[in-house]
Image (spheres, grey):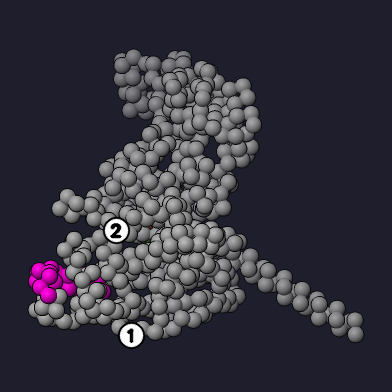
Amino acid sequence: MEVGTVVWVKGLKLRFRLRRGARVSRGQLLKVRVSDVRLVLRVVDFEPVVLLSPSEVARLSKRVEEGREVVVLDRDVRLYDTAVGVVVVEVGEDGVPRGPSCAPPLFSAVETLDEDDLRDLNLDGGDLRIGYLRVGHAATDAVVSLRGDRVIPHHVLVSGVTGSGKSNFGKVLAYAVMSVEEPRYSLVLFDCESEYFLGGSLGSLGLAHLPQAEERLFYVSSSVDEASRVRVTFEFNGATVARSILAHPLEVDVRRLHPLDFIMTGEFSAPQEELLWLAWRTFGDDWLPTLLDMPSSALYSRLRKMVHRNTINTVKRKLRHMLGDGHIFKEGCETDLLRAAVSAVARGKVVLFDIPHASEGEEKLLSVAVARRIFRAYERLKKRAPEEWERLPYVLIAVEEAHRYLSKDALTQHGEVRENIFSVISKRGRKYKVGAMYITQMPGDLMEPVIRQALTKVILPLPTRPDYLKVIQYSPYLEDAEDEIKTLDRGEALIVSPASGLRFAVPVKIFLFEDLARAELARELRLRASARAGARRRVRDEVWAV
Ligand SMILES: Nc1ncnc2c1ncn2[C@@H]1O[C@H](COP(=O)(O)OP(=O)(O)O)[C@@H](O)[C@H]1O
Ligand SMILES: [Mg+2]
């Protein structure tokens, strides 16, 4: 459908006059045909053209005020609406999208995209489906997907204010990962709000409701006493559905913790790190309980006065802060959660740590210990048995409140760089198929290389200027997207993912997880009903055959 006519062009920018009655929204994708090529543009702004004199404007507005009729002579040539667009991609005769190489001539027609155009844009070339292409605030039927094998090792940044749909995106991605037939990918989630497993609030759904959960979910929770399967039963459309899900208690034996689990949080200074290593060498497996329980003065002499008393006291305090009240980090557990989590990752599971009662320190230590072991396992296997490493799934580790780990403040101490496991993964994970998903409402606080290295960006509503400017500054395709980012509603995103072959910032309406889960459940019940009908038929046939 034609919506306008090009009236001005400069470089890749153009302005087109809007047809009367045509509706076009900011961010919408449109096209201009130039011989065999289709130029796809996105609308970035609107500007009315007013060729009236100031006195005419004054006179006419006064008439409006008085409720009288307004007649503008030659209205169509003196007063009309235009929209500004930027050419984002060019689709050649062969149907392949490329960077734009030409500008449209003046007076070309601007049209909406049709199904062929959408197909050629190749928005659904990946295996992780995340939402629909959006026109303004409305979703279309065109699905947008990401390519897991390219997206995961190059990291993902998910940014948006509270309530913008970050957790929903996490669930949608988990569903996508669980829906890939082969266990090609794994995903690690730390859920501080307890909203992933059963859904946080009344009426919402969680990963446990999905039929795929039986095979592909690994649930870690303090509601579980032993490594086993938990049974989840619920009602859907009047039918009872039961799931049996692999589960593990949320407990880590402090004797299994290594100095690096603490050091890689990035919270310890060089002398404090030295103390951790020294204690480890001196006390062996008991290093941590000894550091915690032995009085400072006794430690000071046992460690042959090689460390400062102050350092001992500070380290004790930091360790206690991270180890929390003992409901996660305990002495004498029979299970080995860290090993079980790595093994689940290697089998392509979504590993969900349900940690609503964890303190900030506990959450940090747990996520670092888990991430560190995954990274180490992948790194080692690649070096020692590359063929086996080849078969490992790509793993994506989600980091909530990523600014806590990856801000300038978190990564420097007294002017020195202080790495943590997530900054290491951000730099080196790619080589080993280990990626991170940084989730944050404050991307403005993140270090620039982290934003730049996250090749896939999911930008949900982000109203604060320093935050969206930082994302825009370090991402391709977002130069003119400022106004659009400001007007996003919850669940609406701009997706930048050159790693998935998307050649421009794609406006997306992220699926609502509950819609996906309900569709999945309805399909399951239909299959169940037809299987039952089939069984009844077989019994009847057998009876007659006798
Ligand atoms: N894609 C979406 N479509 C429709 N509603 C959504 C979408 N994403 C989120 N919402 C709604 O917004 C609310 C907040 O989403 P949530 O994912 O919890 O935000 P965040 O994690 O960013 O705080 C949810 O209750 C959900 O109902
Ligand atoms: Mg959330």
| Residue at mark 2 | 420
Tell me which residue sits at (36%, 26%) in the image.
64
Splitting the image into 4 quarters, where does residue 398 fall? bottom left
Is 311 in the magenta? Answer: yes
Q: In the image, residue 447 lies at what x, y percent?
A: 28, 47
| Residue at mark 1 | 332
Q: Give the structural element (helix, strand or loop) at label 2.
A: loop
Q: In the image, residue 101 lies at what x, y percent?
A: 51, 25
Q: Give the structural element (helix, strand or loop) at label 1.
A: loop
Q: In the image, residue 155 lies at what x, y percent?
A: 42, 51
Q: Which residues are magenta?
A: 304-325
Q: Amino acid at mark 1?
A: Gly
Q: Is residue 356 visible?
A: yes
Q: In the image, residue 309 lies at what x, y percent?
A: 9, 71
Q: Nearer the viewer, residue 460 or 157?
A: 157
Q: Is residue 168 visible?
A: no
18 up-or-down from 475: above or below? above
Mark 1 is surrounded, within 10 Å at the Cα level, by few (under 14), some (14 to 19) or many (20 or more) other residues, namely few
- Mark 1 or mark 2: whose residue is earlier in sequence: 1
Q: Nearer the viewer, residue 431 or 62?
A: 431
Measured in 3D between alpha carbons, the distance from the residue under mark 1 to the one under mark 2, in whole angstroms, is 28 Å
Quarter of the rendering occupied by the N terminus: top right
Q: Nearer the viewer, residue 453 or 168?
A: 453
422 up-or-down from 536: above or below? above
In this picture, residue 310 sits left or right of residue 366: left
In this picture, residue 161 sits left or right of residue 154: left
Q: Amino acid at mark 2?
A: Asn
Tell me which residue sits at (45%, 32%) in the image.
43
